[in-house]
Image: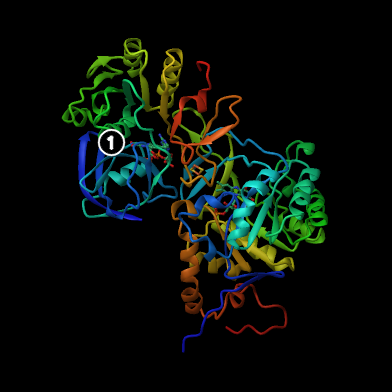
């Protein structure tokens, strides 16, 4: 007998029609992919990071292909939160897909002000705090590498958001668990992981770093094992739902993240190669889940975790 | 979308032109627009349309790396996974004489332009590093257009830069306009010459791309200082830009 597979995903009190969201920065501010992707089918959309004022980003080249991956140094170019509300939010609201707004800043106060501006707007399900931004008061060190700074930023956003706050973890620190715990104590409703890994490529012709920004963030299949590891550790130790990402291209990749402990996943770089990557993952998930013995996404979440003490191992 | 390769040509060493069955293409492309082509890697590769005829569209490329090498290895009958037509192309010919100025792999979109506007009074000025890279000369010739040619090494046509040919043309055609496509240093020089000559110009740029649809902000070129926009996206605001957008009113 073929059971219907339930793709519903729950991130705290947010219900997603399926567990596949567009990852921030790879899906623009909303309308760009509309001619190429059936956006209403997605579990949700995380738009590119928005700051309180516009950021101009880094000089080109801003992307560089690497083995099974991509280095980018976009530099968080964005038009600022007011322009986002004016130009992009109406389209996203009309679309009705679960909307997550990625929030960036150079100081705790900048994060807080973005959150305040967005608090007045309807149609946003959650904020995703990107703590991989340089903290200009601390010499450019990323907020996401220091549990205390991460706590301050997350608390400032939680106090003003009026909606669930997700916190996006950086893999570029050995303190990722502490940072996740700090986010939890500051009131985060979920963790998302991972952001890109710091990397660099050299342009042999120019004898210079290939990217205009010097170093950049590595994404794509090359980083999937890192993402799976972080999701596994964080979801075992911290009692918050986790949204997993990093190199997901297929439904099998998504299942790997579910088993590692993710309640939903985001797809980024894969969309550049195949704009239908997300809808293919969604289409293929029921079959893959069934094949590995799951009747729902929820059943698969954390399936790879060792059984808790006292619980019998079924296998 | 998938387009079938119906013909494969090798116009010069290291260059391949693939003609694709255009019936799967939603819209008729404009000259200057591009196809974003999957070539087996993480990212697609942007390639301009080189021609449209008999229900077929062409892409003509130089093999420079892994993606173009993969593409050069495709055979007739295979399908390509493409997105497009993408971007904004060249405008219709303005009144008066018009020069098409092409460098290297910037030449194909200009041939497509000449094909689209058979009645325009066109001068064609082409340059490349060497004879091999000077592509589509015969295609222009077959349309009765006889390009002025130059190569960096003098192996074909005049020795020199295509912008030297343009300077000569501009002094003879003070009310002319220019459509140009080629490497960035060539386009900077075209911008300078046409600004000085008070002639309008449209410039087709290349930049490394991610998405190709305006979402990732990878493919930017700087806007003219004080012109309102810090960056334009080559994939959606371009690849063809009116010169003023990037260079303002003063010579660069
Ligand atoms: C709008 C547009 C139209 C183009 N039209 C043509 C054309 O008609 N014929 C042609 O031969 N070439 C054209 N190019 C350049 C072409 O895209 C590159 O030569 C090609 O992407 C190289 O890929 P590769 O994998 O062989 O090289 P690699 O150097 O291995 O590529 C590595 C990465 O860099 C990118 N890249 C490398 N060179 C360029 C470049 N010059 N411009 C943009 N991205 C680059 C690639 O897309 C890839 O992501 C065009 C570029 C743009 C932006
Ligand atoms: C071009 C590009 C831009 C990105 N911009 C952002 C951003 O603005 N905010 C953010 O939190 N993450 C950003 N990211 C990170 C992605 O959301 C994601 O965490 C990462 O790319 C890993 O997933 P992937 O391998 O599926 O791409 C960006 C990634 C890429 C490739
Ligand atoms: S390539 Fe993504 S914005 Fe142009």
Which SS class for mark 1? helix
Q: Residue at x 53, y 56 (%)?
A: A247
Q: In this view, does B181 lie to the left or right of B120?
A: right
Q: Where is residue A231 in the image (x, y as percent from the top left)?
A: 64, 62
- Depicted B183 relative to depicted A130: above or below: above
Q: Position of residue A266 (x, y in %)?
A: 58, 60
Q: Mark 1 points at which residue?
A: B116
Q: Residue at x 37, y 28 (%)?
A: B182
- Picture quadrant where residue B58 is located: top left
Work out whether residue A211 can be spotted.
no
In front here: A159 or A141? A159
How dense is the environment of label 1, judged by Cα within 10 Å: few (below 14), some, or many (20 and up)? some
Specify how the rendered protein is coloured: rainbow
Q: In this view, does A96 lie to the left or right of A234?
A: left
- Depicted A42 relative to depicted A23: above or below: below
Q: In which quarter of the image is the N terminus of chain B?
A: bottom left
Q: Residue at x 46, y 25 (%)?
A: B243
In front here: B48 or B12? B48
Q: Furthest-bottom residue in view? A: A1
Q: Where is residue B158 in the image (x, y as percent from the top left)?
A: 25, 14
Q: Residue at x 76, y 37 (%)?
A: A136
- Picture quadrant where residue A267 is located: bottom right
Q: Is residue A300 left or right of residue B107?
A: right
Q: Position of residue B57 (x, y in %)?
A: 27, 45
Q: Mark 1 lies on which chain?
A: B
Q: In this view, does B79 lie to the left or right of A256?
A: left
Work out whether residue A204 can be spotted.
yes
- Depicted B97 relative to depicted A217: above or below: above
């Amino acid at each position: 007998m073929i059971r219907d597979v339930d793709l519903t995903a729950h991130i705290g009190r947010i219900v997603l029609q399926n567990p596949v969201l567009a990852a921030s920065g790879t899906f623009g501010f909303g309308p760009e992919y509309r001619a190429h992707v059936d956006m209403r089918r997605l579990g949700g959309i995380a738009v590119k990071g928005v700051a309180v004022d516009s950021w101009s980003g880094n000089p080109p080249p801003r992307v560089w292909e690497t083995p099974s991956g991509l280095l980018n140094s976009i530099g968080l170019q964005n038009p600022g939160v007011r322009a986002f509300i004016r130009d992009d939010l109406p389209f996203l609201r009309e679309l009705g897909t679960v909307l997550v707004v990625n929030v960036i800043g150079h100081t705790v106060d900048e994060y807080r002000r973005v959150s305040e501006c967005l608090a007045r707007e309807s149609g946003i399900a959650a904020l995703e705090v990107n703590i991989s931004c340089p903290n200009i008061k601390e010499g450019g060190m990323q907020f996401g590498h220091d549990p205390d700074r991460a706590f301050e930023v997350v608390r400032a956003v939680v106090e003003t958001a009026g909606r669930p706050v997700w916190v996006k973890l950086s893999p570029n620190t050995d303190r990722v668990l502490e940072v996740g715990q700090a986010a939890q104590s500051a009131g985060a409703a979920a963790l998302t992981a991972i952001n890109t890994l710091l990397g660099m490529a050299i342009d042999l012709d120019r004898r210079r770093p290939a990217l205009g920004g010097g170093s950049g963030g590595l994404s794509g299949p090359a980083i999937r094992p890192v993402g799976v590891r972080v999701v596994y550790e964080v979801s075992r130790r911290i009692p918050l739902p986790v949204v997993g990402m990093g190199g997901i291209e297929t439904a099998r990749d998504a299942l790997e993240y579910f088993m590692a402990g993710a309640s939903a996943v985001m797809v980024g770089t894969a969309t550049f190669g195949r704009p239908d990557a997300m809808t293919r993952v969604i289409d293929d998930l029921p079959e893959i889940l069934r094949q590995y013995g799951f009747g729902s996404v929820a059943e698969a979440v954390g399936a790879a975790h060792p059984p808790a003490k006292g619980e019998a191992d079924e296998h | 979308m998938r387009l079938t390769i119906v013909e494969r040509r090798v116009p010069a060493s290291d260059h391949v032109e693939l003609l694709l069955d255009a019936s799967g293409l939603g819209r008729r492309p404009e000259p200057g627009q591009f196809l974003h082509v999957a070539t087996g890697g993480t990212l697609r590769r942007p390639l301009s349309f080189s021609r449209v005829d008999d229900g077929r569209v062409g892409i003509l490329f130089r093999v420079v790396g892994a993606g173009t090498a993969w593409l050069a290895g495709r055979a007739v009958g295979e399908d390509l996974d493409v997105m497009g037509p993408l971007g904004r192309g060249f405008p219709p010919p303005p009144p008066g004489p018009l020069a098409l100025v092409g460098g290297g792999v910037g030449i194909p979109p200009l041939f497509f332009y000449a094909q689209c506007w058979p009645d325009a009074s066109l001068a064609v000025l082409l340059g490349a590093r060497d004879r091999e890279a000077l592509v589509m000369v015969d295609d222009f010739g077959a349309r009765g257009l006889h390009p002025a040619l130059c190569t960096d090494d003098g192996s074909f046509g005049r020795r020199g830069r295509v912008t030297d040919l343009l300077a000569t043309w501009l002094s003879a055609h003070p009310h002319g306009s220019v459509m140009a496509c080629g490497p960035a240093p060539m386009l900077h020089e075209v911008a300078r010459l046409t600004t000085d000559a008070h002639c309008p110009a449209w410039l087709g740029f290349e930049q490394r791309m991610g998405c190709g649809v305006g979402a990732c902000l990878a493919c930017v070129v700087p806007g003219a200082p004080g012109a309102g926009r810090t960056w334009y996206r080559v994939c959606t605001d371009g690849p063809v830009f009116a010169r003023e957008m990037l260079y303002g009113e003063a010579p660069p």
